Amino acid sequence: MKLSRILSNRNGVSRRQANFLIASGRVAVNGAICREPATEVDRFSSVRVDDETIQTGENRLYLMLNKPPGFLSATSDDVHPTVMELIAPDLRPDLHIAGRLDRSSTGLLILTSDGRWSRQLTEPRIKIPKVYRVSTAYPIAPDTPERFAAGIWFEFEQLTTSPAHLERLSPCNARMTIYEGRYHQVKRMFHAVGNRVTALHRERMGNIRLDETLAPGDYRPLTADEINLIPD
Ligand code: URA
């Protein structure tokens, strides 16, 4: 929201008065005087007029969870336990999931309160790599990497997946990199070539790697360096 609008949302302050306060250097955003009424200010920023706090600025939260199998990537569910139940109750209300994993899938799951940041991570157009370890029911056919690189037609969405990279590690194990996060994408791609995924573990999103010291079900805050790995 624009700074002038935040001020004029207060009872008794007109848009004109707000602009005047801002232009006179009496308004600080995150502790620094801001003289531009059109400045976009998000809910994470503090706003003060002289010594009066107008907006405190919500905490930004960024967590990495080592998702165990059996937990739904959802905030609540009547049947299955959800990943939110693994997070301390006081942190839950502000968080959303940046890139879901299926209930059976494991590994890196990122939760944040910062919608703009998480869109950068998940928006298919931005093409952030998501890297998975995959186990399959049948040996991976020699032409599978080529077929994934060419893209797989998804009938339901009427689209061809972006080129994916598949590195075969053993007959039934591979490392796969996709640049989108479509519904059951990895499973459906293997299904399309006559195979079946038996285990799926996310190792990395962009350059944020799962911290291998996190036991399944454990989480930790992202470091500032990890947060900055995702372009703004
Ligand atoms: N692709 C899938 O099929 N499942 C996941 O959990 C993630 C990617």
Image (tube, rainbow, N blue to C red):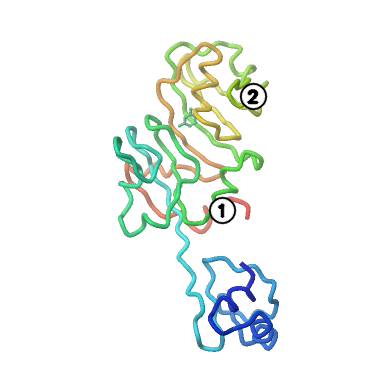
- Mark 1 or mark 2, which is nearer the start of the sequence? 1
- The residue sitting at 42% across, 48% down in the picture is 64
Q: Amino acid at mark 2?
A: Gln
Q: Quadrant of residue 182?
A: top right
**Nearer to us: label 2 or label 1:** 2
Location of the N terminus (image quadrant): bottom right
Residue 104 image point, x, y percent: 37, 29
Say which element carries label 2.
loop
Count of marks placed on residues = 2
Residue highlighted by disc 2: 158
> Of the residues shown, which amino acid type is indicated by label 1?
Trp
* Residue drawn at (43%, 28%) of the image: 200
Mark number displayed over residue 117: 1
Using the image as rendered, state which of residue 16 and residue 174 is in the foreground: 16
x then y, percent, for residue 220: 38, 52
* C-alpha distance separating marks 2 and 1: 28 Å
Q: Residues within 10 Å of mark 2 (few under 14, many from 20)?
A: few
Please name whichever residue, 175 or 44, is drawn nearer the observer in this view of the structure. Answer: 44
Instruction: Please tell me in which quadrant of the rendered image residue 177 appears.
Output: top right
Mark number, residue 74: none
Residue at 55% x, 15% y is 192
